[in-house]
Every structure is written in C-alpha cells, then in structure tokens.
Image (spheres, helix red, strand yellow):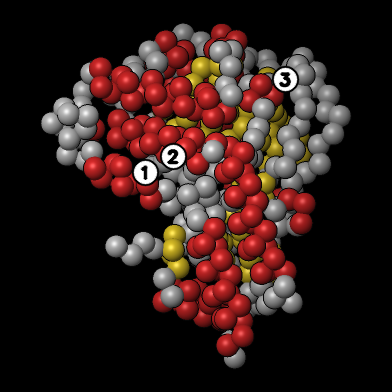
C-alpha cells in the first residue's frame, strides 16, 4: 500500500510500525476478543496499557518520582486554562513569553483567572525569532513563567530555556516533546497535545512537579483539578483509551529506535537537509524564522508572491506531498517533520523543490 508523503502539522504522521501493530490487534487485543476501544477502562488489560505508557514516558524522558505523569483530555488548549486555574494563586502574577499564536491564546485564558504580565514578546517582528532571556529576576509575587517551546505556525523553537531558581517554568511542548533531550527537572510543568510527536489526537500529556499540586484548590471543578487526576492515575473518568494505547505504541517505537538520542540526531539531519535546500535556492524559497530560532519540527518558508506559492502547493499536491500549506493566519508554506517523518521523505521533498524551481516560469 502506498503511503502519503505526510507533512501535516497535526494531526500528523504516525510511525508505520505503530499503525501496523495496531492493525494486528484491531479486532482482538491480547486475546480478549475485543478491540482496545471496547475494553473497560477499569479492566486489568487497560490498566496495564495505562501503566506501560506512563513507564515508557518516564524512561524516555528520565522523569523522576518528583513528578506526576497525567493523561488528560481537551488538548493543549484546555491546559491554557487549567494551568492558571491550578497554579496562579491569589495575589500572584503569571508571566508569559509571547512567541506566536499559541502563547497568545495561553495568555488570553490566564487573564481570565488572575493577574498576568508579558515578560517578553517578538510580535513586532512577526514572530520570526525567540527572545533572548538572561539573568531573569522575579520577585515573590511571580507565580510561574509560561512559554511555548516550539511554534508550529511561525516555525521557531527554543534552543535553550530560561534558567529559573525560585519560579516554576511552565512549557507547552505540544509540537517538539521527545524530539530532543531536555532536563525535565528544570520545569515545573510540561504539557503536550499528542497529535504531533506522541500519537493521535485525543490525549494530552501533563508532567507536573508534585509540590505544585498543593496549589490546586478544592473549589476548582473536579475535572479541572490536577489533584483529581494525580490521585486516580488519570482514570477518574473514562479516558481516551484508544489514544492512550496508540501513545503507548509510539513510545515503544521510540524506545526501539534508540530513544531520544537517536531521534534527536535524525531530526537534526532532516532539518539540515531541508533548510539547506531553502538557503541554496538563492531567494526562490525564503525562510520565515531567523537562523538561531529556526524550528527543527516545523520548517516555514515563503515564495516571492502568491501566484508562485499557489503554483508550488498545487504541484506538490499533485506529486503526492500532503500538508505543505502554511497556517491560514500567515499563509506561505510549512513542512512539519516530526519524529515519524522519515529522512527519505524529506529528501524527496527537497528534490521536488529543486525541480519546481528549475522548471518554474
């Protein structure tokens, strides 16, 4: 069966071995005579899936026992609200770094729950870069600092994170989690929608330092309280069972590939190949992000006018490339090259780009 050359930003490409394994167990998981989505979430079979997924994530990211790992619903967008609801204490201020649309939306939700401040922003430069943050000093009124680690729309990514001592660092890592090594202990809370690097849409991973759970108040709605999910091992209500199963399979695949070290090397290779093709086009293709802020997950670029862009996207679609349209808010082109996108597909894309440039009149 021919597979698409999938460069969608999310839901995105999944590893072929994961899909093949899921297909084999589709009608009969582990001898139960039922598909995974038919299993009771209280059954020992699903409990094992849930536990395995958590253990694999802990192992791959080296997550210590100082943290809870939660599998929630609602996507990163719900976390825009849950983070301030749980962590923005009365009389405190939540600080936000704006690097794109998703950090703007996170700030918008936080404003509904308490006092906020913008620590830094690159909006004036159309979010082409990541701000330089050095020697940050917070007073006791700071509740946390929030940032978006990778910006899918604008194609920028943090290469180094702010070093904080007395204020928790909160990160939306939806589009680059497990694409490179990070030190989890530098963060108070990490959240990520699964539909880019972790699995299918429907499950959201939250990694929260246990001491921060003390900030969650009993007055919060039960389902929006982190302590609810920590106490119940993410099984307070019916979870997205199929999404968690596929998350587990993706994590198994990552481990079998050699873990984050191998995935990071591969992602660096893919990004280098694609950015080189853009740079060597002599201005036919133009990168959106500045050099030191370029994302290795979402490569954004433009052509010189709308007519050229439309012709490129039309020819790319005809050649079998999927998902190269830029986000509707800024246009242009975007190639999302997450963990599951093979190096060979990136090479094919660059060969197409060179051919299109040569033949375009």
Disc 3 element: loop
Residue at image point 58% right, 87% down:
360
Q: Position of residue 161 (x, y in %)?
A: 73, 34
- Circle number at residue 169: none
Residue 81 lies left or right of residue 133; in this view the side is: left
Q: Are marks 1 and 2 in contact (CB under 8 Å)?
A: yes
- Circle number at residue 253: 2
Pair 1/3: label in front: 1
Disc 2 element: helix
Residue 353 lies left or right of residue 278; in this view the side is: left
In the figure, 246 relative to 138: above or below? Answer: below
Residue at mark 2 to residue at mark 3: CA–CA distance: 35 Å
The front one of 12 and 19 is: 19
Query: Count of labels shown?
Result: 3
Neighbor class of circle 1 (other Cα within 10 Å; few <14, some 14-19, many 20+) is some
Residue for badge 3: 167
The front one of 7 and 85 is: 7
Residue at mark 1 to residue at mark 2: CA–CA distance: 7 Å
Residue at mark 1 to residue at mark 3: CA–CA distance: 39 Å
Residue 255 lies left or right of residue 188; in this view the side is: left
Residue 306 lies left or right of residue 168; in this view the side is: left
Residue for badge 1: 18
Q: Residue furthest right?
A: 135
């Amino acid at each position: 069966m021919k597979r698409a050359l999938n460069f969608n930003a999310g839901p995105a490409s999944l590893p072929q071995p994961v899909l093949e394994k899921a297909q084999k167990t589709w009608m009969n998981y582990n001898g139960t005579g039922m598909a995974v989505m038919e299993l009771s979430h209280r059954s020992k079979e699903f409990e094992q899936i849930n536990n395995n997924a958590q253990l694999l994530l802990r192992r791959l990211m080296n997550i210590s026992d100082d943290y809870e790992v939660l599998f929630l619903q609602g996507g990163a967008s719900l976390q825009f609200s849950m983070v301030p609801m749980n962590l923005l204490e009365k009389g405190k201020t939540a600080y936000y770094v704006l690097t794109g649309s998703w950090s703007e939306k996170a700030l918008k939700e936080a404003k509904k729950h308490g006092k906020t401040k913008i620590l830094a922003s690159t909006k004036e430069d159309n979010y082409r870069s990541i701000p330089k943050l050095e020697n940050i000093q917070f007073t006791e009124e700071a509740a946390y600092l929030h940032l978006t680690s990778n910006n899918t729309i604008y194609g920028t990514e943090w290469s180094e994170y702010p070093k904080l001592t007395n204020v928790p660092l909160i990160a939306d890592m939806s589009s680059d989690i497990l694409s490179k090594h990070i030190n989890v202990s530098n963060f108070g809370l990490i959240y990520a929608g699964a539909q880019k690097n972790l699995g299918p849409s429907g499950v959201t991973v939250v990694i929260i330092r246990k001491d921060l759970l003390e900030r969650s108040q009993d007055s919060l709605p039960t389902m929006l309280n982190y302590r609810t999910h920590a106490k119940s091992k993410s099984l307070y209500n019916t979870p997205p069972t199929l999404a968690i199963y596929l998350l587990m399979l993706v994590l198994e695949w990552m481990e079998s590939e050699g873990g984050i070290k191998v995935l990071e090397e591969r992602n660096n290779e893919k990004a280098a190949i694609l950015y080189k093709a853009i740079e060597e086009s002599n201005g036919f293709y133009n990168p959106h992000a500045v050099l030191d802020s370029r994302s290795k997950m979402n490569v954004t670029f433009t052509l010189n006018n709308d007519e050229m862009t439309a012709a490129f996207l039309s020819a790319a679609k005809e050649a079998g490339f999927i998902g190269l349209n830029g986000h509707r808010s800024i246009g242009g082109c975007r190639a999302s090259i997450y963990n599951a996108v093979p190096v060979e597909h990136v090479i094919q894309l660059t060969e197409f780009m060179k051919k299109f440039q040569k033949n375009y009149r």
